[in-house]
Amino acid sequence: MQDPAVFSPSSTLTFGFAAVLLMGLLVKLWLASRQIRHVALHRGAVPAAFSQNITLAAHQKAADYTITKARFGLLEMALGAAVLLGWTLLGGLNWLNQTLLAWLGGGMLQQLAVLGGFVLVGGLIDVPMGLYRTFVIEQRFGFNKMTLRLWLADMLKSSLVGALIGLPIAALILWLMGTTGPLWWLWAWSAWMGINLLLLMVYPTFIAPLFNTFKPLEDVVLKERVTALMQRCGFAAKGLFVMDGSTRSAHANAYFTGFGAAKRVVFYDTLLAKLAPAEVDAVLAHELGHFKHKHVIQRIVTMFALSLVGFALLGWLSTQVWFYTGLGVIPNLSGAPNDALALLLFLLAVPLVSFFIAPLSAQVSRKHEFQADAYAIQQTSGQDLSTALLKLFEDNASTLTPDPVFVKFYYSHPPASERLARMSLQVTA
């Protein structure tokens, strides 16, 4: 006769967790291998559609950069799986909790210490990976502009800002979990959403300047063009700013930041150095297209909905003993709260499942990018947008020949060939 314990909820969760982790690893390995092989196979020649604009040297640099990052990603993937197993089924989180419980006793301080210890260990594990990514990979391909001193300063500032913001938020969520009854998850979700909206408003003014210098756009001609475009599109922003992106990276970008009346338009100085004014117009019009089609609002609403489901699920799981024991943790049965444990176990387990629905999110994002491109063509010039994107693809060493299956799973933006082909049809229509 089979041992009933084999079919207990705890053991079922353990087996299911291990199976999903292994399945996810195999899928990620398969996708990365496809990407590496496909890019390497097409490294020798520039695709015909780009032969007049992209040199073979630039194409091969993009291929080598993509392959190098993908191979490093395999190492990160293996390390991430090992760390996840270490925290859960191998007992790391249980050891941390029991150690701090014996030292501090139950209570808010102990729970915050568990969260802080988890974040600290994770951060220390990420340090050598971040160093290699910045000072080996990015350096090798000419993108890194950071000194070790600046990198360390950024890490220190990020840690301090994270602690100053994260600890009060964590304390609030834990307090709500412990004091507001069975529907704590609804109160916690409301607080979480309010805090996120607040951070969207204060980030441009108070947080971003801690890491970069933002100066008002001084180019009079470009400023007039951009202002005219925004007026034509019925869009208002608090200001036009140039960010010193070149102090950290050679990659170029432009983006909107903030929320409501606090929105800002930010151009990397590297972008302005590489694009002509008309091309900057086209890139900005693309970003305006996201607002015109309400993509930002849609993403916020989606985040609201998914987080509500997540908090509701956590509210139920946090009361189930098998949720803890099935993931390698002995819950506190002596009256000490388990809220920090529940939060961490949930945050560790959810990405395993969400990975398999990532292609749906990526597909929606690529659709939004096509819509923003179409809007930019209506407001500016399709030719300017095409040349701008080609320059950005080349300067950022984005491969022109990604694996189609890899694209479907991971790419939030359509690959260059698809974007430019769609633009060509829209321009001639």
Image: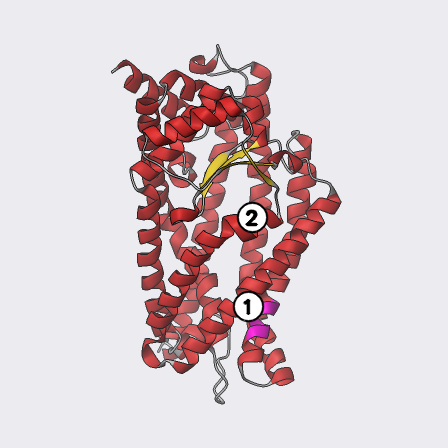
- Please tell me whether residue 341 is drawn above or below residue 43 in the rendered image: below
Looking at this view, is 216 or 276 the one in front?
Answer: 216
Horizontal side of residue 34 vs 356, given as left or right: right
Question: Residue placed at 30% from the left, 16% from the top?
Answer: 427
x, y (%) of residue 190? 35, 66
Which of the 4 image quadrants contains residue 365? top left
Task: Indicate whether residue 99 is drawn in magenta.
Answer: no
As shown in the figure, which amino acid type bears the numbered disc 1?
Leu
Disc 1 crowd rating (10 Å Cα; few below 14, some 14-19, many 20+) is some
Numbered badge on residue 208: 2
Residues at marks 2 and 1, CA–CA distance in whole angstroms = 19 Å
Question: Residue placed at 57% from the left, 57% from the top?
Answer: 82
Residue reaching furthest to the top:
52
Numbered badge on residue 167: 1
Disc 2 crowd rating (10 Å Cα; few below 14, some 14-19, many 20+) is some
| Label 2 or label 1, whichever comes before in sequence order | 1
- Please tell me whether residue 29 is drawn above or below residue 372 in the rendered image: below
Question: Image quadrant for the N terminus?
Answer: bottom left
Magenta region: 112-117
Is residue 126 visible in the rendered structure shown here? yes
The local secondary structure at tag 2 comes to helix
As shown in the figure, which amino acid type bears the numbered disc 2?
Ala
Question: Residue placed at 54% from the left, 21% from the top?
Answer: 43
Question: Image quadrant for the C terminus?
Answer: top left
